[in-house]
Image: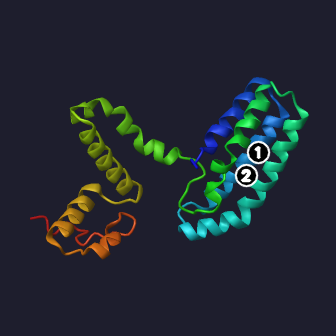
């Protein structure tokens, strides 16, 4: 099941509210804003802490929103833009609520999209790949670099250290997890061993 971005759902209601001043669209925006407020309060916490907070605070709001959306859909014209926005939310509900049970998942993917924007903007520069395999390798490297950046890790230091550890055999296969960017610790944080 895909993780559907809440921002898309919110945008549909926002556009309707701006165009029509619909009180129902405004209420949908208010409910979504309450979820974003919870996310702002738990930003930076561990995945387990975020999951627990979401279970306690977000899950009841999401359950109430689901009931409310279904009720509103039965009250309005099925051909209206508002009905389309509600159907969009309900049709993608499974993806919209994935964040509740996994603290690693964001409410929306804006952070990842912002991180990937330079990659998307520079994709013509990657035409040198010359083959599908080259393109796949470029995508893997771009993903590794962005993952390091998202975890406040210097990509060059991380990749240099990880590749050296793997090639030299200092890190065994059963220890590879310790090299993930969200676990990795720079053995030379000051840059003393740069020779």
- Left or right: 181 with respect to 87? left
The residue closer to the viewer here, 89 or 118, is 89
Which residue was labeled with disc 2? 34
On the image, the x and y values in percent for residue 62 come to 75, 54
The C terminus appears in which quarter of the rendering? bottom left
- Callouts 2 and 1 close, C-beta under 8 Å: yes
Query: Which mark, residue 30?
Result: 1
Which residue is depicted at the point 20% across and 69% down?
165
Which residue is depicted at the point 24% across and 60% down?
157
On the image, the x and y values in percent for residue 166 come to 21, 67
Q: Is residue 179 above or below residue 152?
A: below
Q: Is residue 146 above or below residue 191?
A: above
- Left or right: 171 with respect to 113? left
The residue closer to the viewer here, 10 or 88, is 88
The residue closer to the viewer here, 91 or 46, is 91
Q: Residue 161 is drawn in which quadrant?
A: bottom left
Q: Residue 184 is drawn in which quadrant?
A: bottom left
């Amino acid at each position: 099941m895909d993780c559907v971005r809440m921002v898309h759902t919110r945008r549909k209601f926002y556009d309707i509210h701006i165009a029509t001043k619909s009180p129902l669209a405004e209420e949908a925006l208010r409910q979504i804003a309450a979820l974003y407020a919870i996310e702002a309060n738990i930003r930076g916490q561990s995945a387990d802490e975020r999951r627990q907070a979401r279970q306690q605070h977000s899950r009841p709001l999401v359950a109430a929103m689901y009931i409310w959306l279904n009720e509103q859909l039965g009250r309005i014209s099925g051909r209206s833009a508002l009905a389309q926005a509600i159907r969009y939310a309900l049709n993608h509900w499974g993806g919209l609520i994935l964040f509740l049970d996994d603290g690693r998942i964001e409410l929306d993917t804006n952070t990842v999209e912002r991180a990937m924007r330079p990659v998307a903007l520079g994709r013509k520069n990657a035409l040198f790949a010359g083959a599908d395999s080259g393109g796949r390798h470029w995508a893997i490297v771009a993903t590794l670099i962005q993952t390091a950046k998202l975890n406040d890790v210097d990509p060059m230091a991380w990749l240099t250290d990880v590749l050296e550890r793997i090639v030299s055999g200092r890190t065994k296969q059963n220890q590879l997890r310790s090299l993930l960017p969200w676990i990795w610790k720079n053995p030379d944080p000051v840059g003393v061993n740069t020779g």
